[in-house]
Each structure stands twice: as C-alpha cells, then as structure tokens.
Amino acid sequence: MRIAPLASILALVVAAADGKILYETKCAQCHGKEGVAKPPGKGSKNFNDPAFQSAWTEESIARITAEGKGKMPGYRSKLSPEQLRAVAAHVKTLGSSK
C-alpha cells in the first residue's frame, strides 16, 4: 500500500477546503462569496471575471493578499504562507464556472 501519495492527495484536499473557509471568513465580506466585489470592496477586481482570471496567477494573488493593496490590509502577519497560497488557489476557482 502506498501511503505517501494518498497523504499528498489528502493534504491538497484539506488545503483547498482551508482556502475556501479562509476566503469566506477573511475576504468575502468585501470581495463577495462568489468573487463579485461588495460595497466595502468597491474598486477591487471581480475575481470571477475571465480577464482577472487570465491576468492574475496564484502567486500574484498570494503576494497581494500578503502585502495588501489600496484599502485592503496585508495578511502576512495573520496568515501563514500556506494559508495565503490556499486562499489564492480558492480565488482561482471562482472563475472556473464562468
């Protein structure tokens, strides 16, 4: 039985779930649960927009989330690098059905 590949798959599933939960608790109040900016996030990109999805990588999303931009504070001191990547990965899923 090969445990290591199964553990890797489980880790990816857990990270994806964590990214969604973190997004919904830390980001959705401004960026919307589906990635459409709400009034507090006015002026921010709609994450479900195909133009946003093609222009922004997970790495660039994680960097902006860590550093902050405009009215949005940085989350580097609040989220681990793994959590920042998980949130960025979730943001990329918001455009998958558009």
Image (cartoon, grey):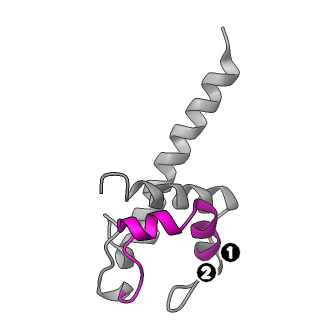
Q: Secondary structure at mark 1?
A: loop
Q: Is residue 29 magenta?
A: no
In the depicted view, which residue is nearer to us: 28 or 51? Answer: 51
Secondary element at tag 2: loop
Identify residue type, mark 1. Ser
Question: Which residue corresponds to mark 1?
Answer: 77
Dividing the picture into quadrants, the one containing residue 56 is bottom right
Which residue occupies 45% across, 64% down? 53
Horizontal side, residue 95 vs residue 5: left or right:
left
| Residue denoted by label 2 | 74
From what the image shows, is residue 70 above or below residue 49? below
Q: Which residues are magenta?
A: 42-64
Location of residue 50 (image quadrant): bottom left
Name the residue: 35% across, 88% down: 42
Measured along the vertical axis of the image, is residue 35 above or below residue 85?
below
Q: Nearer the viewer, residue 53 or 8?
A: 53
- Asked whether disc 1 touches disc 2, contact meaning CB atoms under 8 Å apart, the reply is yes
User: Could you tell me which residue is drawn at 64 percent across and 31 percent down?
Assistant: 8
Q: Give me the C-alpha separation between circle 1 and circle 2.
A: 8 Å
Residue closer to the observer: 11 or 91: 91
Counting from the top left corner in percent of width and height, residue 54 is at 48, 63
The image quadrant where one finds the N terminus is top right
Judging depth in this view, the residue of 6 and 54 nearest the camera is: 54
Position in image of residue 23 (x %, y %) = 45, 63
Quarter of the rendering containing residue 25: bottom left
Whole-percent x, y for residue 66 in the image: 64, 74
